[in-house]
Image (cartoon, helix red, strand yellow):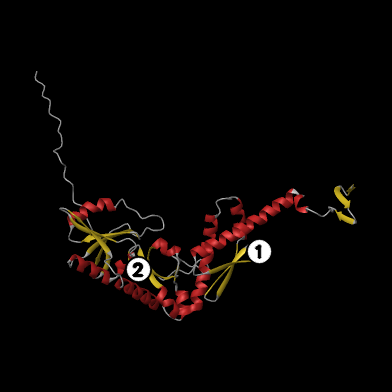
Amino acid sequence: MRTLIAGGLIGVACVFGGACTSQVGPDANTGVFKTPEQAAESRRQRLLVDWQEMALKIANAERPDVRTIKTDGFAIRMSADGVERTVDLSPLTEKLSANVGREREPIRAYLAEQMPPLDRARLAAIGFERAKPMLHPRLANNKQTTAMAAPDTKAPPIANKVVIDLNWVPVVRWGGSGAQTPVDAEMAKAWGVDERQVSDVALANLRTALAKEAASTIETVDLPGLGRYGMLRGGIDPTYVVLPEWLAAVRKEWKTADDLIVFLPSRSSVNFLERKNERLLNQLMPEWSKRVGQPGEGLLNLPVVLGDGGMTLLEHKAPATKPTTAPATKPRVYIVN
């Protein structure tokens, strides 16, 4: 057996009944001998693949109505209803590098910004007739209504005034997710219809949904000596309150012809009582004044009166409070000379 040294590498040659040689050449195991720069680039490439796959999983989980696949480079491709969009993930690189182990939220927020243009293109592609069943009203205060403007065109949504700072906006609800796309005048024009037609269809769908409710939409609480108040059951669409049919259903259930005082600080908190019940109203008003909707969910922090003519602001003057005891007086001091 001979030991050969060549090019700084050790090779072993053996001869056993013939010329049988096994030798390690200068190009073997080159991956072991990486420069620091090569090692850093290799790690970066692995991270890009991991982030791309994470973006793919988040997109498919949150928007199952949109098909999302990997594509060349640091990007993903989204498609639905014949519309396709490639989303470049490169703008995320710096933020993800600074948040290793906490990448999900930056990716989720970025993808949420990329979806609206795709959804608007889908609406234009499917047309008004196919979009009709997906149209529904959504309650929004003035600030929320402004924020619902299309991110690409900045066009404001169609807004229907309910009372003071409260509107309802026709939106398209995408099946399989909670995603919604506000409809604006430009989209209505692309569909070949006017704003009123869009709003009428949204309200008609809301009426249909209310009629299909298998059980009462409300829960009633009786307070001894004070009367009753109601609240929407969990999961019930708060937009029902704009429908005359909802008011009629509550009146029928409560066996009353009275108007309702409604307090809706958020979509998940809607309370009401009969207008004539001033005593209970005086008890509830101080508590209501302390309640504010959560950020993004807040609606209206002022009670309204709901009657046959729609909603109006409540004009209410709290009764003057009487002192429980007579005020103490300082006794006079008489000085006798």
Task: Tell me which amino acid carries mark 1.
Answer: Gly
Label 2 Cα crowd, 10 Å radius (few <14 / some 14-19 / many 20+): some
The numbered mark, 1 or 2, whose residue comes first in the sequence reads 1
Along the line of sight, the residue nearer the viewer: 157 or 34: 34
Q: CA distance from mark 1 to mark 2?
A: 47 Å
Q: Which residue is under mark 1?
A: 73
- Residue 299 drawn at (x, y percent): 35, 60
Which numbered tag is attached to residue 275?
A: none
Give the side of residue 74 with respect to residue 317, left or right: right
Label 1 Cα crowd, 10 Å radius (few <14 / some 14-19 / many 20+): few
Task: Tell me which amino acid carries mark 2.
Answer: Lys
- Residue 83 drawn at (x, y percent): 55, 74
55 w.r.t. 5: above or below: below
Q: Which residue is under mark 2?
A: 161
- For image coordinates 21% across by 55% down, the residue present is 281
- For image coordinates 53% across by 61% down, the residue present is 58
Label 1, secondary structure: give it.
loop
State the image quarter where residue 18 is shown: bottom right
Give the side of residue 127 with respect to residue 196, left or right: right
- Residue 241 drawn at (x, y percent): 30, 66
Number of marks in the image?
2
- Residue 149 drawn at (x, y percent): 46, 66
Identify the image quadrant of the C terminus: top left
Give the side of residue 263 with respect to residue 329, left or right: right
Furthest residue in direction left, as rendered: 336
Q: Is residue 289 visible?
A: yes
Q: Is residue 317 visible?
A: no
State the image quarter where residue 52 is shown: bottom right
Give the side of residue 289 with respect to residue 182, left or right: left
